[in-house]
Image (cartoon, grey):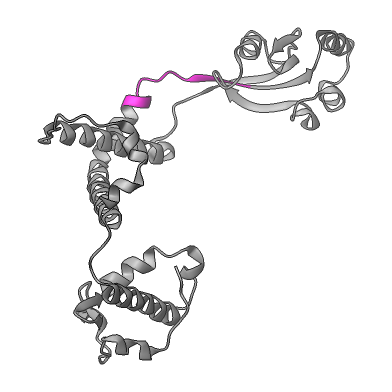
Amino acid sequence: MSFALRPLAVLALGATLALPALADEIGPDTVVARVGDQEITIGHMIVLRAQLPAEYQQLPDDVLYQAVLDQLIRQTAVGEAIGKELSTGARLALENERRSFVAGEALSRLAEAAVTDEAVEAAYNATYGEADPTNEYHAAHILVETEDEAQTIEAQLRDGADFAQLAKEKSTGPSGPNGGDLGWFSEGMMVKPFEEAVTVLEPGEVSAPVQTQFGWHVIKLYETRLKDAPRLADVRGELVQQIQRDAMEEALEKYTEEADVSRPEIEVDPAILKDQSVLDR
């Protein structure tokens, strides 16, 4: 979208400057310019401004106001000059755009209406209300390529070597420079053989070598803890998104099922969708 600024004289295309209106007198249908018999309103300008890239949003209000008005005037003038007769392809594209926009607006309204305090609380209870506390583990590992290397490291640890120092020297994993520390994680976050080895360790214990698709691990468990269900406030955003997704999916199924849909019994070669020349018939 071009936003080269034009002087106020551009309004001579058909718009008429009026005396400044009071703020409480201005609404979405307030006319700010006319091009031929088409009106440009404050509402048109507000919608266009909201669609601008972020870099344009930073312009001073007076500059952006005139730029938005200028753009709408130029678009309208070009449309007036060319005429309202669109090509078949352009007309159908416009119909598709309208269909998509109206459906999106309808679904957006339904999604917003579905989010109530009661719905959020119900979603929280359904997800977390009866959830048992989950185990979390704080562990570190030393990752090497071969079993022999892992066994050597295990022997060094039994002889009193420092785990974190060995991890910095020997581990090929990304946590190596941090002493192999993996931080806290819960069940399901690690690959199965690794997880199974961790869950049978006692805090302070080191595992025998464990093989995964990443290589051979020697694991040290530092501590464990029980994690309770999160507070509603901490997961409200996730719950809202889920409620909205569910509302939109339900609406799509409901209204599609209720719609009076008919499909003429004609044979169509699916490959016709690739044939742009059909639009010229």
Asked if residue 100 is positioned above or below residue 190 in the image, the reply reads below
Relative horizontal placement of residue 196, taking residue 117 as reference (left or right): right
- Work out whether residue 197 or residue 70 is closer to the camera in this orientation and state it: 70
**What's the magenta region?**
126-137
The quarter in which the N terminus is drawn is bottom left
Residue 219 seen in render: no
User: What residue is drawn where x is 21% and y is 76%?
Assistant: 38
- Work out whether residue 114 or residue 234 is closer to the camera in this orientation and state it: 114
Q: Is residue 278 magenta?
A: no
The image quadrant of residue 138 is top right
Horizontal and vertical percent position of residue 131 = 40, 20
Asked if residue 195 is positioned above or below residue 40 in the image, the reply reads above
- Work out whether residue 212 or residue 84 is closer to the camera in this orientation and state it: 84
The image quadrant of residue 61 is bottom left
Q: Does the magenta stretch include residue 132?
A: yes
Q: Give the total of numbered labels.
A: 0
Relative horizontal placement of residue 98, taking residue 209 as reference (left or right): left
User: What residue is drawn where x is 81% and y is 8%?
Assistant: 147
Asked if residue 124 is positioned above or below residue 114 in the image, the reply reads above
The image quadrant of residue 182 is top right
